[in-house]
Amino acid sequence: MNAIVAFPTPAEKTLGEQFRALRTTGAPDIGRERAYAAFSAAGLPHRRIEAWHYTDLRGMLRDVLPIAAGPDAATIDEARAFIGSLPALEGCRIVLVDGVFMPELSDTAALGGGVKVRSVLDDLSEAKLTPGLAAAQKLGSDESVVSLNGAFLQGGASIRFEPGIKVEAPIEIVSISSGKTPSAVYTRSYIDVGEHASATIVERHAVLNNVKTQGHHVLVFALGDGSSLEHVAKIDALGNDTLHIGSVLARLGADAKFLSVTLLSTGGVTRRQSYLEFAGPSSQAHF
């Protein structure tokens, strides 16, 4: 029986070059080396992998775009204008621009003391993930595009709900790709819901200027015992030349309830995937 040898594609070679360049910038490791090693061993997913049979990324991804640069003043102004054009939200918004958490564009004043929001890079670089989140992020550790996200992670939001707190108004995480030039964006946000707490997270993505974009996004959820979380993803403003890969990693404690809904109306290529662990009895998940 002859073994099938998969030589690196041009896209995989470019990703290797990008990662080697990233290491020279002094960016904090935060698990990048381990994540890239996992991706490199697996390569881009292809049609021989059953879960990717209809999204043959190895054959589809002919070129890899450069990683988006951090937003400049003009980009921030454009993002602010876009946020202002969105429907009014009876809740709070957390804004990411080209992968970077932007406190100056976010509105979290109404959250009160029971919810803490900060850049996910702070949590990762200081190794402050809770045990639930640390376990939840391992759910996709053997999946190549989740590993790729970990290797090139630019930023995201870390949201922690104290035990017992009930947040009625939704919290929206808006990830904006500026579209200044064709580029790739890698975000990962962590949502930690304490025991018997409840909240609603709205995930929204937008690409401005209809420029070719490759988006790799991960949301990690850890639900404590008796907690409840609703998650709504609105994928409706990406343009016709966008590759969007979104992954949900969710770990549910005992008696926890998780509802995840995706509303999809856009062009380009979009793949949404979920990884779920029931870490306690009587928990429920609805997708």
Image (cartoon, rainbow, N blue to C red):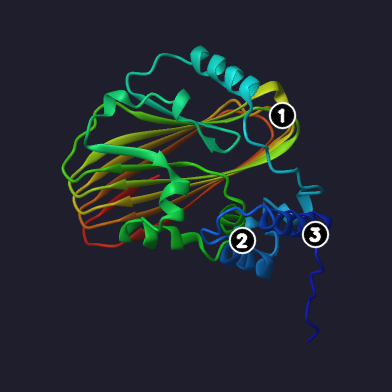
Nearer to the camera, 23 or 82: 23
Answer yes or no: do the residues labelled 1 and 3 have beta carbons within 8 Å? no
Q: Please give the label number shown on residue 13.
A: 3
Left or right? Give the position of 261 relative to 162. right
Left or right? Give the position of 245 relative to 1. left
Residue 89 pos. (x, y %): 38, 18
- Quickly name the residue at label 1: 240
Query: Going 37% across and 35% down the picture, which residue do you hit?
Result: 201
Q: Earlier in the sequence, mark 2 or mark 3?
A: 3
Q: CA distance from mark 1 to mark 3?
A: 26 Å
- Quickly name the residue at label 2: 144
Residue 281 pos. (x, y %): 22, 61
Total number of numbered labels?
A: 3
Q: CA distance from mark 2 to mark 3?
A: 15 Å
Q: Secondary structure at mark 2?
A: helix
Residue 287 pos. (x, y %): 40, 44
Residue 175 visible in the picture: yes
**Amino acid beneath label 1:** Asn
Q: Secondary structure at mark 1?
A: loop
Query: Going 75% across and 56% down the picture, which residue do you hit?
Result: 58
User: Which quarter of the figure has residue 106?
Assistant: top left
Q: Earlier in the sequence, mark 2 or mark 1?
A: 2
In the displayed structure, 3 sits above or below 107; it is below
**Amino acid beneath label 3:** Lys
**Amino acid beneath label 2:** Ser
